[in-house]
């Protein structure tokens, strides 16, 4: 995958700043979240530990905590302010989230024990990764054998109209790149996951004007965070050129914004299944698994 490098500090700051406005504007994110939640109904068994990675303000975390009352739900996000929005829970709902714990951490270095998670749920977080293979290796490390992974990510055709409109102005990155579905699937296989299933759909939002779209992206923390983006305010001339170019996509009196949504499902393999790393294939076993294997072979 060759994507525009992302500014890690800018990602975190962007979502911190958007914490107070996120829930008011994340209409599409909530719709995709509900579709992803439907997929975990096919869990092979009731999970004991669930990780909601990139939980944002905790909407899905609360739903899963209510659905799996006996499970321990970890609501993980990189932005502290987003996690802070999980805390104000109405008294009537407090019983349903007694088994939910917020955790501020980077998805590339998860502070969780090996083979400790039964289900990883991640809605629209992976497109913010600057090293997707490292994320999948971390997933593999913390997942129990046969644990389930379900996730969504935006694909490369997301905000196609906005990208094209900006390209008529200059070659600088103005809209974030996102990984291709096939590349994500290849990384899952390289990490040793079993039964990966990938599919995608295209959703279109419509706006009365393009500036409303851009303000909404900022309100949910999804504006441009490319490392080589132009810093400072966009000039009025450049902005006007972009808006004029966007007119080519206008439908009647509405302006479309396309989103390519990638869905992924996979299962963690048995212990000892090799995983590809920068240093070659590596297979790991727990002490208990090695002991069990020795006993089955009659080794003292």
Image: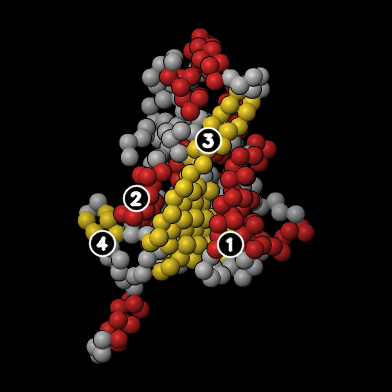
Q: How many marks?
A: 4
The reply, left or right, for residue 125 in relation to residue 218 is left
Residue 68 seen in this snapshot: yes
| Residue sticking out furthest to the front | 252
Q: On the rendered image, what quadrant is the N terminus found in?
A: top left
Q: CA distance from mark 1 to mark 3?
A: 25 Å
Please rate how many residues cluster around mark 4, counting C-alpha atoms within 10 Å: few if below 14, some from 14 to 19, many from 20: few
Labels 4 and 3: the sequence-earlier one:
3
The foreground one among 80 and 170 is: 170
4 or 2: mark nearer the eye: 2
Q: Check disc 3 and report the residue beneath it.
A: 259
Position of residue 114 measured from the top left corner of the image (x, y, whole percent): 40, 66
Q: CA distance from mark 4 to mark 1?
A: 32 Å
Q: Which secondary structure lies at badge 2?
A: helix
Labels 2 and 3: the sequence-earlier one:
2
Q: CA distance from mark 4 to mark 2?
A: 15 Å
Q: Check disc 4 and report the residue beneath it.
A: 282
Q: CA distance from mark 4 to mark 3?
A: 37 Å
Q: Is residue 182 above or below residue 223?
A: below
Q: Which secondary structure lies at badge 4?
A: strand
Labels 1 and 3: the sequence-earlier one:
1
Q: CA distance from mark 2 to mark 3?
A: 22 Å
Give residue 41's mark: 1
Please rate how many residues cluster around mark 1, counting C-alpha atoms within 10 Å: few if below 14, some from 14 to 19, many from 20: few
- The reply to whether the C-beta atoms of the residues labelled 2 and 3 are less than 8 Å apart is no
Q: Is residue 277 above or below residue 2?
A: below
The foreground one among 151 and 248 is: 248
Q: CA distance from mark 2 to mark 1?
A: 25 Å
The reply, left or right, for residue 6 in relation to residue 80 is left
Please rate how many residues cluster around mark 3, counting C-alpha atoms within 10 Å: few if below 14, some from 14 to 19, many from 20: many
Q: Is residue 115 above or below residue 288?
A: above
């Amino acid at each position: 995958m060759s994507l525009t490098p992302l500014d890690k500090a800018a990602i975190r700051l962007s979502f911190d700043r958007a914490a107070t406005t996120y829930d008011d504007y994340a209409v599409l994110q909530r719709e995709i979240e509900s579709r992803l939640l439907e997929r975990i109904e096919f869990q092979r068994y009731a999970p004991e530990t669930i990780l909601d990675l990139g939980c944002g303000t905790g909407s899905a975390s609360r739903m899963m905590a209510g659905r799996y009352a006996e499970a321990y739900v970890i609501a993980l996000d990189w932005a502290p302010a987003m996690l802070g929005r999980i805390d104000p829970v109405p008294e009537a709902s407090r019983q349903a989230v007694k088994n939910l714990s917020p955790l501020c951490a980077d998805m590339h270095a998860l502070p969780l024990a090996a083979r400790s998670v039964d289900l990883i749920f991640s809605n629209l977080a992976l497109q913010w990764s600057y090293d997707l293979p490292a994320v999948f290796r971390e997933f593999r490390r913390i997942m129990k054998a046969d644990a389930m992974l379900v996730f969504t990510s935006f694909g490369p055709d997301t905000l196609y109209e906005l990208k094209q409109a900006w390209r008529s102005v200059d070659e600088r990155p103005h809209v974030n790149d996102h990984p291709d579905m096939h590349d994500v699937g290849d990384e899952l296989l390289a990490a040793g996951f079993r039964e990966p299933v990938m599919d995608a759909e295209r959703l279109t939002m419509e706006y009365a004007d393009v500036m409303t779209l851009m303000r909404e992206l900022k309100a949910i923390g999804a504006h441009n965070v490319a490392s080589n983006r132009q810093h400072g305010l966009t000039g009025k001339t450049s902005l006007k050129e972009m808006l004029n170019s966007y007119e080519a996509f206008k439908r009647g009196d509405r302006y479309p914004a396309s989103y390519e949504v990638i869905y992924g499902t996979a299962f963690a393999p048995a212990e000892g299944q090799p995983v590809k790393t920068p240093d070659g294939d590596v297979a790991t076993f727990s002490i208990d698994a090695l002991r069990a294997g020795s006993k089955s072979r009659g080794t003292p």
